[in-house]
């Protein structure tokens, strides 16, 4: 049922694993989720606080800059927009950075995204998935357990932090981990925005 592949991509039914550094080992008592940056008051949410938020189920295509694309994975998670209910944004906040663990540093990985692109069901912090070949299952440690961001399909998958640890709200766009290393700030697969 041919969907359109972005230029330079091939389709796979597998879900490859790619990341820098160690797989994060989840311990609930040491885990929290921070909302910070250009907001009136920063807030730290516990694992239970996060898991008690309303759930969203969405089917999202993933496009990795290393050229694989996986269509139609269904995820259960917490929509990015749910976190907006906890913060009062300062005027002119237009970007966010979503952070994840890298080798034990909770802010070691990050990716920048425009806030306005993250208000739908397809901008999701996920903990469960299924597809045509797999029943519902937890996101594995290697894919980002206990919480992993999946960006809308209009962004390459590096914008999806595994082992997500927080959101920083920003007035100015600021490069994240891969963007500082030459990858695109805007990262639209359909425009083949791989590098900057
Ligand atoms: N915390 C963290 N998140 C990360 C990365 C990483 O190194 N650390 N790599 C990114 C990159 S480059 C890709 S392509 C995707 C891969 O996700 P997957 O292994 O679940 O397919 O995770 C992204 N999220
Ligand atoms: Mo990647």
Image: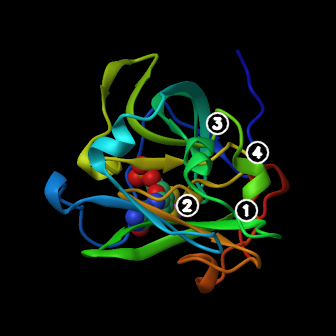
* Left or right, 84 with reference to 137: right
Q: Position of residue 31 (x, y in %)?
A: 25, 59
Q: Residues within 10 Å of mark 2 (few under 14, many from 20)?
A: many
Q: Is residue 168 visible?
A: yes
Q: Quadrant of residue 52?
A: top left
According to the image, label 3 marks what residue?
A: 122
What is the CA distance from the residue labelled 3 to the residue labelled 4? 18 Å
Q: Are marks 2 and 1 in contact (CB under 8 Å)?
A: yes
Q: Earlier in the sequence, mark 3 or mark 2?
A: 3
Q: Nearer the viewer, mark 4 or mark 1?
A: 1
SS of the residue at dot 4? loop
CB at disc 2 and ligand 1 closer than 8 Å: yes
The earlier-in-sequence mark between 4 and 2 is 4
Q: Which residue is mark 1?
A: 187
Q: Nearer the viewer, mark 3 or mark 4?
A: 3
- Answer with mark 1 or mark 3, whichever residue precedes in sequence: 3
Which residue is drawn at the image coordinates 78% and 64% (left, top)?
193
- Front residue of 48/163: it is 48
Residue placed under numbered mark 2 in the picture: 158
Q: Earlier in the sequence, mark 4 or mark 1?
A: 4
């Amino acid at each position: 049922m041919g969907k359109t592949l972005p230029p330079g991509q091939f389709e796979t039914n597998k879900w490859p694993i790619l990341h820098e550094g160690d797989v994060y080992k989840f311990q609930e008592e040491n885990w929290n989720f921070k909302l910070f940056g250009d907001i009136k008051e920063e807030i730290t949410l516990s694992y239970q606080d996060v898991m008690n938020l309303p759930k969203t189920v969405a089917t999202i295509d993933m496009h990795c800059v290393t050229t694989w694309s996986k269509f139609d994975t269904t995820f259960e998670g917490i929509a990015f927009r749910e976190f907006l209910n906890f913060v009062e944004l300062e005027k002119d906040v237009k970007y966010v950075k979503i952070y994840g663990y890298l080798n034990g540093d909770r802010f070691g990985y990050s990716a920048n995204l425009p806030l306005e692109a993250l208000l739908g069901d397809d901008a999701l912090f996920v903990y469960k998935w299924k597809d045509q070949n797999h029943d519902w299952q937890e996101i594995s440690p290697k894919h980002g357990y206990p919480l992993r961001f999946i960006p809308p399909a209009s962004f390459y998958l590096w914008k999806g932090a595994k082992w997500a640890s927080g959101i920083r709200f920003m007035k100015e766009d600021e490069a994240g981990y891969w963007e500082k290393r030459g990858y695109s700030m805007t990262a639209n697969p359909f425009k083949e925005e791989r590098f900057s």
